[in-house]
Image (cartoon, helix red, strand yellow):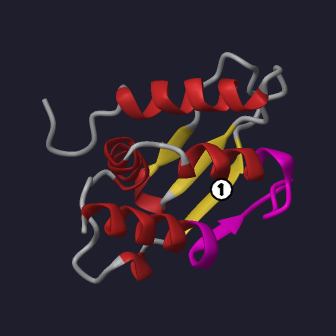
Amino acid sequence: MRHAVHYVLFLFLNLQNTLYEGDYHAGHPTIITFWQVFENLSAENKRKFLLFLTGCDRVPFLGMDVVRMTVAVLPDATEIHLPESLTCHFLLLLPMYRRYPVERTMETRLLQAINHNRGFWKD
C-alpha cells in the first residue's frame, strides 16, 4: 500500500500537476533526467522530496490534486548548486546540470537538498 501511495505521488507530480517555466518543458533533457532520478528514489526519499517541495511530508488533506508543482531554472547556477524550493508556491528551482554523468550529478545534488531540508515545525 505504501509503495502504491508513492507511485501515485509520482504520477500526480509528473503527469498531471507539473508546470514548467522559462527554458524548461516536459521534453527538456534536465527535466527528463530529473524524473528518471525521482522515479528511482526510495519511498522515504520521495517523502523527503514532498517535504522539500511543500514544507510537509504528508499528502495534503484534499489530495495531491492541490499540489501543482512548478519547475523553473535556478538562475546563475553551476554544477555545485543544489536544487532549491519555494514551499509556499510549490516551486522547484532546478539547475541545468551538464557534468557527466548528468544522472549522478542530479541524484547527488537532489539528495543533498532533500536531506538538509528542515521543513515547517522542525527544530
Left or right of 49, for residue 12 = right
> Does the stretch in magenta take in 117?
no
The N terminus lies in quadrant: bottom left
Q: Is residue 18 magenta?
A: yes
Task: State the image coordinates of residue 120 (x, y, percent, origin top left).
Answer: 22, 45
Instruction: Tell me: residue 57, above or below residue 1.
Output: above
User: Type of residue at label 1?
Assistant: Val
Bounds of the magenta span? 14-30
What residue would you read off at disc 1?
71
- Residue 76 seen in this snapshot: no
Residue at screen point 26% across, 54% down = 56
The answer to whether 42 is drawn above or below residue 107 in the figure is: below
Where does the image place residue 65, in percent across and percent down from the top left?
43, 82
**90 sits left or right of 58 in the view:** right
Image quadrant where residue 105 sits? top right
- Count how many numbered circles sit on residues in the image: 1
Q: Closer to the camera, 55 or 41?
A: 41
Left or right side of 88 for 122: left
25 left or right of 93?
Answer: right
* Residue 41 sits above or below residue 10 on the image: above
- Closest to the observer, 11 or 24: 11
Residue at 41 percent across and 35 percent down: it is: 114
- Residue at 61% x, 43% y is 37
How crowded pointer 1 is (Cα within 10 Å; few <14, some 14-19, many 20+) is rated as many
Q: Residue at x 27, y 34 (%)?
A: 118
